[in-house]
Image (tube, rainbow, N blue to C red):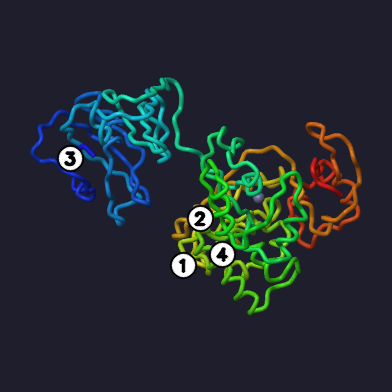
């Protein structure tokens, strides 16, 4: 980086270490406010005063390579920065260099969570080479991004492209929405597989046909790489799949020996690069796992820096209890935990969101790394939200559904034959309270 000298005027600034160039002439000075997060990254950078407007937030962001001592993180700081290079050079390692592409004058959302700022982004081959004000730099292709937003690729934390990518690795459905990282494995993953699971995976294939040539999760990811995929891919190891590997779809607790083998499978997946352990506790066979089983598996993932992520046991009437379960797992297994698609299903449960957020914040204050992601949808419950006792119910109605698909099963037809489970709300289906308004459609399911 270009050397930017910084003078500390405040005691607080002593906490920040970076490159100094003592002998250079001062050309400008800004007073900057910023926040240092728990990972040591700076965000919310705001220039309070500047001797030259060209030494802006973009300029400050361009030079920030600060290392924040861990004990001083999670705090806001104010400090002066002295610039010893001209404004159009402060923002890149080689601002006068040449790049393949420069996006100019875009509004940059850099992913740090801080405020967006107007600036330029330079690319060299497939890398971001510089961010900031790149007035003097040149590129083979320059694109005016005035009025447009520039952001890092989005992360799909709940990608369901695990088979689609086998067919077409270009990932156009996601790339064209800005998604560059697909994180797969919600509750079950593409490995580890045993012979029965492989046979079922082969038998259940619809339009997309593929040979199941892998056994472990790592082998699947390597297989994808070898086929060629345009996006980045990652996966959690699904606790449901690990359970099925040892117990099939049985509704019982594992024996100590089975649980030990399940833990070994989790460890193996972590060594192969899994991001952590996932559950989807409304789907078979995940729904059969009790909390202590999940804790044991999460404990196997934790030493590898894994994360626990969960489609919780209920997103409706038992929402708060389900969140408590996730927090308990995080605490007992000493593992960061994330709620998949946080929401409150059913109008009666919508007011619970305030309590949900309060409980997450209380857990974070306690020192637990609880996070959540979300999607936006107004869709009714998915097939998996049918109560387990009704998964095999016969078709009750067929009519035309969205985009001409056949509605294969009407929940109202099934509901009368199935008593609500002992703990109503354990499935999304019953938490809606008005099952006649739910329908289950799937244009591909063969009944
Ligand atoms: Zn889900």
In primary-sequence order, the first of circles 3 and 4 is 3
Q: CA distance from mark 3 to mark 1?
A: 39 Å
Alpha-carbon span between mark 4 and mark 1: 15 Å
Location of mark 1 (residue):
303
Q: Quadrant of the N terminus?
A: top left
- Circle 4 SS class: helix
Identify the residue at horizontal 36%, vertical 34% (top origin). 124
Which residue matches tag 4? 329
Q: Is mark 2 within 8 Å of ligand 1?
A: no
Q: Is residue 357 visible?
A: no
Which residue corresponds to mark 3?
6
Q: In the image shown, does 421 or 121 lie closer to the viewer?
A: 121
Q: Distance from label 2 to label 3 (Cα)?
A: 36 Å
Left or right relative to 438: residue 362? left
Q: Is mark 3 within 8 Å of ligand 1?
A: no
Q: Which-is-in-front pick, marks 3 and 4?
A: 3
Where disc 2 sits, the SS reads strand
413 up-or-down from 57: above or below: below
């Amino acid at each position: 980086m270009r050397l930017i000298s910084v003078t500390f005027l405040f005691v607080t600034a002593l906490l920040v270490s970076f490159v100094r160039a003592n002998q250079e002439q001062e050309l400008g000075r800004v007073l900057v406010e910023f926040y240092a997060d728990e990972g040591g990254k700076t965000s919310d950078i705001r220039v309070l005063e500047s001797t030259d407007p060209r030494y802006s937030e973009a300029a400050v962001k361009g030079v920030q390579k600060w290392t924040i001592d861990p004990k001083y993180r999670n705090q806001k700081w104010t400090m002066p920065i002295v610039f010893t290079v001209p404004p159009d050079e402060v923002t890149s390692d080689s601002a006068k260099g040449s790049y393949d592409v420069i996006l100019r004058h875009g509004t940059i959302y850099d992913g740090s969570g801080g405020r967006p700022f107007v600036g330029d982004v330079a690319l060299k081959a497939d890398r971001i080479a510089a961010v900031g004000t790149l007035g003097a730099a040149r590129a083979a292709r320059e694109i005016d991004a005035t009025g447009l937003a520039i952001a890092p690729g989005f992360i799909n934390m709940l990608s369901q492209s695990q088979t689609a990518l086998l067919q077409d690795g270009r990932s156009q459905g996601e790339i064209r929405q800005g998604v560059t990282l697909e994180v797969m494995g919600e509750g079950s993953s593409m490995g580890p597989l045993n012979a029965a699971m492989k046979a079922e995976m082969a038998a259940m294939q619809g339009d997309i046909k593929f040979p199941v040539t892998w056994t472990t999760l790592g082998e699947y990811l390597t297989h994808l790489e070898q086929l060629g995929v345009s996006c980045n891919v990652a996966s959690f190891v699904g606790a449901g799949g690990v359970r099925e590997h040892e117990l099939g779809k049985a509704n019982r607790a594992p024996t100590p020996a089975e649980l030990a083998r399940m833990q070994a499978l989790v460890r193996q997946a972590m060594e192969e690069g899994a991001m952590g352990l996932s559950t989807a506790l409304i789907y078979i066979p995940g729904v059969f796992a009790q909390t202590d089983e999940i804790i044991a598996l999460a404990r196997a993932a934790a030493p590898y820096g894994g994360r626990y992520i969960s489609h919780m046991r209920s997103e409706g009437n038992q929402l708060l209890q389900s969140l408590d379960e996730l927090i308990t797992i995080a605490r007992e297994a000493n593992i960061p935990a994330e709620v998949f698609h946080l929401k409150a299903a059913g109008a009666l449960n919508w007011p619970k969101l305030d309590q949900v957020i309060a409980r997450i914040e209380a857990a974070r204050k306690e020192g637990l790394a609880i996070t959540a992601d979300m999607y936006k949808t107004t869709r009714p419950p998915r097939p998996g939200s049918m109560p387990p006792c009704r998964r095999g119910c016969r078709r009750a109605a067929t009519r035309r559904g969205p985009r001409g698909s056949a509605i294969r099963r009407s929940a109202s037809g099934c509901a009368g034959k199935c008593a609500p489970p002992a703990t109503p709300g354990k499935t999304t289906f019953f938490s809606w309270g008005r099952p006649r308004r739910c329908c289950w459609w799937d244009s591909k399911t063969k009944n």
